Each structure stands twice: as C-alpha cells, then as structure tokens.
Image (cartoon, grey):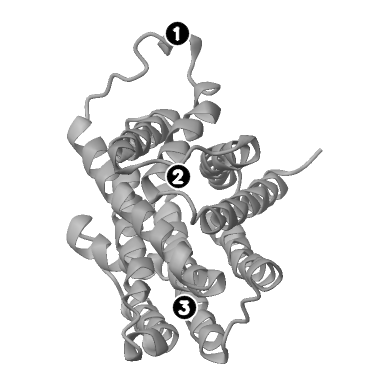
C-alpha cells in the first residue's frame, strides 16, 4: 500500500509524462491548423472529466455562482494554450519547456497585485534569477529577430493568471467543473477556426490528434491528484523531468540539440521557481503553526 507522499509522487510523475507526450504530439501536428488541434485538445479533453461528475449533478453540473471568474480563467488559459501551441511548432522542444518553467515567477508578481500578498526578499531574489535565466535563453532569439520566443513568455503570463484564478475558484468550485469549462472553451475556439480550412486526418492522425486532448485532460487531473495527496514542495521538483523528456524527444525525433545557453538559462529558471515553491511552503507551514497555537 502506497503512502500519501508516494501517491503524490506517482501522480506527479504520470502527469509530467502525459504533458510531455502531449507537447510532442502538438509539435508533430504542424501539418494541421492550430485551430483544428485546439478543437481536439478541448473536445477530447472533456472525456476524462465526464467520469468525475457526480451522478446527482449530471443534469445541472454546469451551474456556477462565479461565471465571470470562470470566463477570466478560460480566457487567460486560451491565450496561454494558443501561445504554447505556436511556440512548440516553431522552437526547439527543450527551449520551449525551459522557458515555461518561469510561470511561478509571473505568478509571484501577479499575486502582489491580485491577491495583495506580501513578497519578501527571497522571492524577489528568485524572480530576479528567473528573469536572468529567461534573458540567457531568449537572447539568441531576440538578436536574430526570432519573435517566436515571445510566445512561451505569453504562455507563462497566461498560466500565471490561471493559477491565481484557480486558487480563487477552488474555494467554492469542484475541480471537474473548472476543468470542464476550460476544455469546453478550447473546443469552441477551435471550432470557430473551421472556416479557415481544416485538413481531413487519416485514421492514425485522428487517433494521435485525439490523444492530444485525452493526454491534456488526464495530465491536469493527475496534477490535481498529486497536490491532493502530497505537499507541493515535495512533488514539484518532479516537474523538471519535463526538460529531460524534452531533450530526449527533441534529439531523437527532430535531431534538436539544446545549446549551452539554453541549458544554463534553464538551470537559472528552475532554481528560481524552486526557491519560490520552497519559500511558499515555509510560509504556509508557519501560518499553519500560528493558527493551531
């Protein structure tokens, strides 16, 4: 029988694997319009969520008292998703994954203005280190006017607001409802691109496109389960396995070899986000102790 921490590790590991495979499929699908891939991500992403809806809520599962916040969460999530899809198609896999690790940096900044949180010296130092890492990674791209490096940063900005919105929504809304609205909005956005000309996939491509959605939906649910069973600070380091997978897949599928600058920048960004997570957990533990006293 696995302990709670072991279950948390297990769910985080399979979540990272699922996200990594989804990234590979998104990068592979560059012969299909982005909107078409988005549709499959949203429509097929709903499938795992349907199994979580309680039977007594099946007829009115969509009801919510916070539609505006759901809308903001979905809009920021859509911006982030479109940005990461474009980045994955136009940049090396390891480079994109490295920059996405900077999301906690922007979450820290947003939390100051949106949640009125106080950020101390350690987290400001982590933010500075993270920005240096981003500059190290993107400098070759900006110098050669490769503006595709902007898209992973847009993803980080969108994802950061998503983290804030989910933190607010989760106080009253079930995880499956938050996930459903997002997957549904992805499918609608993708469907609106139909007039731009979709490509009829063969049977194998249809299966792989469907897996983009199923893997994305499962990865999000497994991530939530990981945080349910284990402390965030314990399982978060496993997220950085995504960079290892990105380097392996990038090399063997697309013959991509990450540059030294990419690896150095990735280490700085990882160090930054790790400091932020550790500091948040220390502060949370102190709060917990003071409340019990």
Q: Nearer the viewer, residue 285 or 1?
A: 1
Q: Which residue is mark 2?
A: 37
Task: Decide which of tag 2 and tag 1 comes sooner along the chain.
Answer: 2
Q: Nearer the viewer, residue 56 or 285?
A: 56
For the point 63% across and 62% down, the residue is 238
Q: Which residue is mark 1?
A: 56
The image quarter in which residue 267 lies = bottom right
Q: Can you say whether 162 is above or below 88 in the image?
A: above
Q: Which residue is mark 3?
A: 269
For the point 41% across and 12% down, the residue is 57
Q: Residues within 10 Å of mark 3 (few under 14, many from 20)?
A: many
Secondary structure state at the residue bearing disc 2:
helix
Q: Are marks 2 and 1 in contact (CB under 8 Å)?
A: no
Q: Is residue 137 left or right of residue 121?
A: right
Q: Nearer the viewer, mark 3 or mark 2?
A: 2
Q: CA distance from mark 3 to mark 2?
A: 29 Å
Q: Can you say whether 61 is above or below 256 in the image?
A: above
Q: CA distance from mark 2 to mark 1?
A: 33 Å
Percent position of residue 288, x then y: 44, 52
């Amino acid at each position: 029988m696995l302990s709670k921490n072991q279950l948390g590790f297990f769910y985080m590991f399979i979540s990272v694997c699922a996200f990594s495979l989804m990234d590979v499929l998104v990068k592979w699908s560059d012969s299909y319009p982005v909107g078409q891939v988005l549709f499959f991500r949203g429509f097929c992403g709903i499938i795992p969520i349907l199994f979580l809806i309680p039977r007594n809520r099946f007829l009115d599962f969509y009801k919510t008292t916070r539609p505006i916040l759901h809308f903001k969460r979905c809009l920021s999530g859509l911006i982030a998703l479109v940005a990461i899809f474009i980045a994955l198609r136009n940049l090396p896999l390891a480079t994109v994954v490295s920059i996405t690790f900077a999301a906690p940096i922007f979450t820290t900044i947003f939390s100051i203005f949106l949640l009125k949180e106080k950020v101390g010296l350690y987290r400001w130092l982590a933010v500075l280190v993270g920005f240096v890492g981003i500059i190290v990674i993107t400098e070759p791209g900006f110098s050669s006017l490769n503006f595709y490096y902007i898209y992973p940063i847009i993803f980080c900005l969108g994802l950061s607001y998503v983290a804030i919105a989910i933190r607010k929504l989760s106080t009253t809304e079930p995880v499956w409802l938050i996930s459903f609205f997002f997957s549904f909005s992805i499918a609608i956005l993708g469907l609106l691109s139909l007039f731009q000309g979709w490509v009829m996939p063969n049977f194998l491509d249809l299966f792989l496109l469907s897996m983009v959605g199923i893997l994305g939906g499962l990865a999000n649910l497994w991530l939530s389960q990981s945080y349910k069973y284990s402390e965030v600070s314990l399982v978060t380091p496993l997220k950085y396995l995504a960079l290892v997978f990105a380097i392996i897949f990038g090399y063997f599928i697309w013959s991509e070899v990450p540059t030294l600058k990419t690896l150095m920048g990735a280490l700085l960004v990882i160090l930054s986000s790790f400091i932020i997570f550790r500091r948040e957990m220390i502060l949370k533990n102190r709060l917990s102790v003071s409340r019990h006293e």
